[in-house]
Image: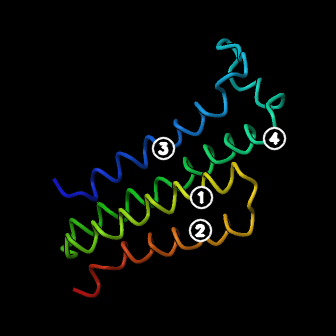
Amino acid sequence: MPLAYWCVLIAALLPYVWAKYAKTGSGSDNRHPRDDYDGLAPHKRRAYAAHQNALEAFPFFAVAVVIALTMGAPVHTVNLLAVLYIVLRIAHALLYISDKPAARSLVFAAAMALNVAIFVLPAFK
């Protein structure tokens, strides 16, 4: 199985890492887990926002990888771009949590550009 598919799995799980971080130590009530986020510390609220952003960004990445690989894009290139995407998405969340909005936005744009690159790779084979 191509490394890029493992990256899709990692990208699917990353949002839950950020959510777990946001809720750890908050004493949240599992009966109404979404009601607790307003009372979180600022960095924990930003972790939850990183969770939401990771969920929103995931479908495009997953579709881009599947399309690229099924349409015959070079596997090694898709693998490389997928790994870079994961690195950027981790950096994005860490920048989000540490309140670095300008850097976070640049990293988000770079990750989005990688998605586009992965998606269009088959057109250049």
Please give the name of the residue rendered at 36% of the width and 62% of the height, measured from the top-left corner: 83
The spot of residue 8 in percent (x, y) is: 35, 52
Callout 1: helix, strand or loop? helix
Instruction: Give the mark nearer the N terminus: 3 vs 4.
Output: 3
Q: Are marks 2 and 3 in contact (CB under 8 Å)?
A: no
Report the Cα–Cα distance between label 3 and label 4: 20 Å
The residue wearing badge 1 is 92
As shown in the figure, which amino acid type bears the numbered disc 2?
Answer: Val
- Say which of 99 and 5 sits in front: 99
Report the Cα–Cα distance between label 1 and label 3: 11 Å
Left or right: 50 as drawn, with respect to 88: right
Left or right: 96 as drawn, with respect to 61: right
The residue wearing badge 2 is 107
Callout 2: helix, strand or loop? helix
The residue wearing badge 4 is 42
**Marking on residue 14:** 3
As shown in the figure, which amino acid type bears the numbered disc 1?
Answer: His
Callout 3: helix, strand or loop? helix
| Disc 1 crowd, CA 10 A, few/some/many (<14, 14-19, 20+) | many
Callout 4: helix, strand or loop? helix
As shown in the figure, which amino acid type bears the numbered disc 3?
Answer: Leu
- Say which of 28 and 60 sits in front: 28
Q: Are marks 2 and 1 in contact (CB under 8 Å)?
A: yes
As shown in the figure, which amino acid type bears the numbered disc 4?
Answer: Pro
